């Protein structure tokens, strides 16, 4: 399971303030905490706190100074994305994200190739959020085809079927699960498949339970990545257990602990 | 018609840990040679697919007492030196080309001669001063007694970077502490059980013992005695390690001689089973054939007994590593 730590995001007030005041402490602290918890990538997002590409570069550099973890450069703006990628010190990275927009893909795929980065493609097009599994698969297939034609190995493409809040769009979760299953059939080896996990639990009371339950259901269909709150120990335990039941990990009595420990090795 | 050969190469993501056993003068020991094992980036001998930078090695077994239960064919080559572990070890190295010596402190077994920790320490020192190759030091198998003899033994071998064994799920604290204190590597033992193989490693890692200093011993079965179970466990451990499970990405040890020379196919004299043929040939062949199977399953260290089996196995390793036809 590829874990992308969501916390260095200007959607959180402490990070927004840190970006505006160029106070590196909250950024470093969250980068460190998430890396220690086993994040494979630290997602960095300047959100609405800034429109300046140099602020993204600052955020990337600040995280890089603190941890050796790979970085997920998170922006829908191509200019900000490019600035974040330029600031990388050569370590592995993720372009988060593109949509099924040919213009955007024509720019971002070569950037991924150039920076030796993976590319996360959200299965959305100019018509907006996909209403069903078919539209998700259509968009995902288009992203996958352009990415691999452009020189990315399937292993460097991550597709996101777009998760919707269960409280407001309850009919969408089954479509997402179906789309995940179909993404796995796009190629052999298949692309990675990720969701923005917190989306499903927007404004619900049983937040942790809903996240964990969706997660294991989605893993059973082929989900192997998530942008998520890696500090959630119950969620990590659920992932470790799902990997065990899917026979991706060798059982041991301390398997939950081993799942976390191996990330420190 | 041209037959299309499908591309079967795989790219594995994680190398198996490399490990050096033994320390020469400049590293604080007195060994004249050291051994490096592991480091594979592919399954065994797939040289077309990845790297197998270090050759598997053969350790020969020496006891701290005269092993009366060893069958004749495997006693004869050592009969005149078995009372002296130093002389025995020297013969293994000088005449039979042992890469390492495995000193098995069988004499300390309370159900046997019940030798003392001082005796075990003396035997260890004796072997260390008699040969220059690295040492594996294996306890008597009785947990309480091993926890008593290993502290002075590990201290006596301090700086020599030995391989001590074994730790198990129920008994790992003494040896992990000694390994840390005196800089030795450890053998993690499990009873033909992949889940316990992983568990014992986790326990050792938990007390701060480094993954790079652990070697997996998943138990060994002789040819005809469960070898396929061990094979599949070794194969699965190795593949999981290569795929990124760092808790099991470690070199593997097989204890061949002790298993093979306990089965009737290897030890029965020709007088008992005439149709099986010459026992002096059959036993070594059984031991070598067992070793070959484990090489293919991913063994990095083989502990063996019979000089002829050792010779054949080392020759085969040379061929498999690309050094002959």
Image (cartoon, coloured by chain):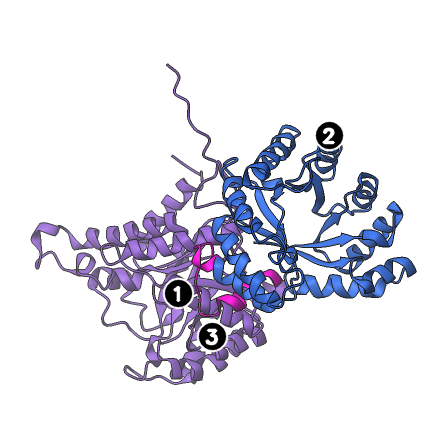
Q: Is residue B57 left or right of residue A174?
A: left
Q: Is residue B164 above or below residue B147?
A: above
Q: Name the element at disc 2.
A: helix
* Tag shown at residue A106: 2
Q: Are marks 1 and 3 on the same chain?
A: yes
Q: Is residue A111 above or below residue A30?
A: above
Q: Which chain is purple?
A: B
| The N terminus of chain B lies in quadrant | top left
Highlighted magenta segment, given as a residue range: A243-265
- Chain letter of mark 1 equals B
Q: Is residue A256 magenta?
A: yes
Q: Position of residue B276 (x, y in %)?
A: 12, 51
- Residue farthest to the right, as pictured: A21
Nearest the eye: A17 or B91 = A17
Q: Is residue B298 left or right of residue A175?
A: left
- Chain letter of mark 3 equals B
Q: Colour of chain A?
A: blue
Asked if one can make out residue A32 in the rendered structure from this viewpoint, the answer is yes
Q: Name the element at disc 1.
A: helix
Locate residue B121: give its quadrant: bottom left
* Tag shown at residue B125: 3
Rounded to the nearest angstrom, the CA distance separating label 1 from label 2 is 68 Å
Q: Position of residue B26 (x, y in %)?
A: 64, 63
Rounded to the nearest angstrom, the CA distance separating label 1 from label 3 is 12 Å
Q: Are marks 3 and 2 on the same chain?
A: no
């Amino acid at each position: 399971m590829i874990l992308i730590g969501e916390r260095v995001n200007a959607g959180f007030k402490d990070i927004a303030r840190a970006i505006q005041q160029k106070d590196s402490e909250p950024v470093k602290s969250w980068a460190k905490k998430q890396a220690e918890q086993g994040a494979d990538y630290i997602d960095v997002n300047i959100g609405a706190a800034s429109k300046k590409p140099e602020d993204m570069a600052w955020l990337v550099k600040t995280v890089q100074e603190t941890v050796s973890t790979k970085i997920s450069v998170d922006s829908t703006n191509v200019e900000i994305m490019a600035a974040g990628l330029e600031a990388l010190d050569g370590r592995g990275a993720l372009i988060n994200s593109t949509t099924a927009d040919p213009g955007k893909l024509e720019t971002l795929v070569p950037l991924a190739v150039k920076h030796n980065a993976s590319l996360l493609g959200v299965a959305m097009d100019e018509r907006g959020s996909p209403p069903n599994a078919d539209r998700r698969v259509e968009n995902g297939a288009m992203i996958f085809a352009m990415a691999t034609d452009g020189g990315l190995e399937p292993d460097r493409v991550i597709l996101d079927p777009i998760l919707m809040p269960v409280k407001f769009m309850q009919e969408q979760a089954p479509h997402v699960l179906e789309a995940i299953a179909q993404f796995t059939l796009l190629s052999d080896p298949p692309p990675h498949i990720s969701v923005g996990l917190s989306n499903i639990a927007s404004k619900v009371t049983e937040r942790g339970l809903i996240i964990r339950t969706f997660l294991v259901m989605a893993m059973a269909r082929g989900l192997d990545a998530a942008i998520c709150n890696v500090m959630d120990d119950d969620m990590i335990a659920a992932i470790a257990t799902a990997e065990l039941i899917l026979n991706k990990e060798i059982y041991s009595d301390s398997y939950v602990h081993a799942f976390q420990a191996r990330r420190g090795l | 018609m041209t037959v299309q050969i499908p591309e079967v190469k795989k790219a594995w993501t994680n190398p198996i840990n490399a490990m050096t056993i033994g320390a020469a003068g400049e590293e604080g020991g007195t060994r004249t040679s050291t051994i490096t094992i592991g480091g594979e980036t592919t399954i065994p001998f797939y040289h077309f697919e990845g790297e197998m930078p270090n050759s598997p090695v053969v350790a020969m077994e020496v006891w701290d007492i005269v092993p009366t239960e060893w069958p004749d064919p495997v006693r004869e080559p050592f009969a005149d030196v078995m009372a002296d572990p130093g002389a025995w070890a020297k013969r293994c190295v000088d005449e039979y080309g042992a890469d390492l010596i495995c000193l098995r402190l069988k004499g300390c077994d309370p159900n046997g001669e019940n030798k003392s920790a001082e005796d075990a320490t003396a035997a260890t020192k004796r072997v260390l001063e008699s040969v220059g190759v690295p040492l594996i030091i294996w306890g008597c198998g009785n947990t309480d007694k091993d926890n008593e003899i290993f502290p002075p033994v590990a201290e006596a071998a301090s700086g020599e970077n030995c391989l001590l064994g074994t730790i198990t799920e129920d008994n790992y604290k003494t040896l992990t502490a000694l390994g840390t204190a005196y800089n030795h590597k450890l053998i993690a033992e499990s009873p033909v059980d992949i889940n316990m193989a992983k568990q014992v490693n986790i326990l050792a890692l938990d007390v701060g013992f480094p993954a790079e200093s652990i070697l997996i011993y998943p138990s060994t079965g002789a040819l005809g005695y469960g070898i396929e179970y061990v094979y599949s466990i070794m194969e699965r451990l190795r593949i999981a390690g290569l795929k990124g499970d760092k808790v099991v990405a470690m070199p593997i040890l097989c204890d061949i001689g002790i298993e093979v020379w306990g089965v009737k196919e290897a030890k029965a004299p020709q007088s008992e089973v005439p149709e099986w043929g010459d026992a002096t040939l059959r036993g070594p062949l059984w031991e070598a054939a067992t070793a070959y199977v484990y090489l293919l399953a991913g063994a990095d260290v083989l502990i063996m007994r019979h000089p002829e089996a050792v010779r054949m196995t080392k020759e085969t390793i040379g061929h498999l590593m690309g050094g002959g036809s």
